[in-house]
Image: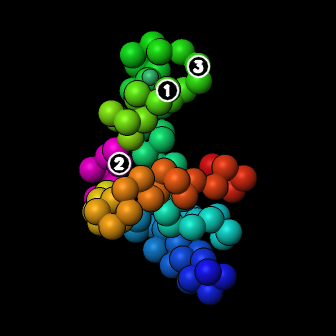
Amino acid sequence: MGVLLSIDQLAHVLFSPILFYRRASEDETISSRLGKLRLSAARAQCLALGHGEPSPCAPCVTEHARISWKYPLAKIIDAGLELIDPNHSLDAVERDEDD
Ligand SMILES: [Zn+2]
């Protein structure tokens, strides 16, 4: 697990600019960043719908936690992970790492 985690973190640092248009935080995995993108999409919908706290609420996560086509590569990778392991990226969110 440790080696795979390190490879994921390295890949994140290398590919973050083309996946997420930003510098990676070095200790975060790609999956965690994908999950945060999904949660931020759900949060935007949840706020727009006026659902209040906690945001995003569980139904909004279920319905709206999808990565925007603004991040096409991230969206495609997340869709692939979703086929292999449903909710993989949402489960991988590391809340202690940089947002
Ligand atoms: Zn909501």
CB of mark 3 near ligand 1 (< 8 Å):
no
Q: Which mark is residue 67?
A: 2
Determine whether, in the image, residue 94 is placed left or right of residue 58.
right
Residue labelled with disc 1? 57
Q: Identify the residue shown where x is 45% and y is 13%.
A: 50
Q: Is residue 41 above or below residue 36?
A: above
Q: Is residue 28 above or below residue 41?
A: below
Q: Earlier in the sequence, mark 1 or mark 2?
A: 1
The amino acid marked with disc number 1 is: Cys
Q: Earlier in the sequence, mark 3 or mark 2?
A: 3
Alpha carbon separation for disc pair 3 and 2? 22 Å
State the extent of the magenta-drawn residues as a range.
66-72
Q: Measured from the top left, where is residue 26 in percent x and y?
A: 66, 70
The image quadrant of residue 48 is top left
Question: Which is more toward the observer, 58 or 97?
Answer: 58
Alpha carbon separation for disc pair 1 and 2? 17 Å
CB of mark 1 near ligand 1 (< 8 Å):
yes
Residue labelled with disc 3? 53
Q: Identify the residue shown where x is 46% and y is 21%.
A: 47
Label 2's element?
Answer: loop
Q: Measured from the top left, where is residue 44 in percent x and y?
A: 44, 29
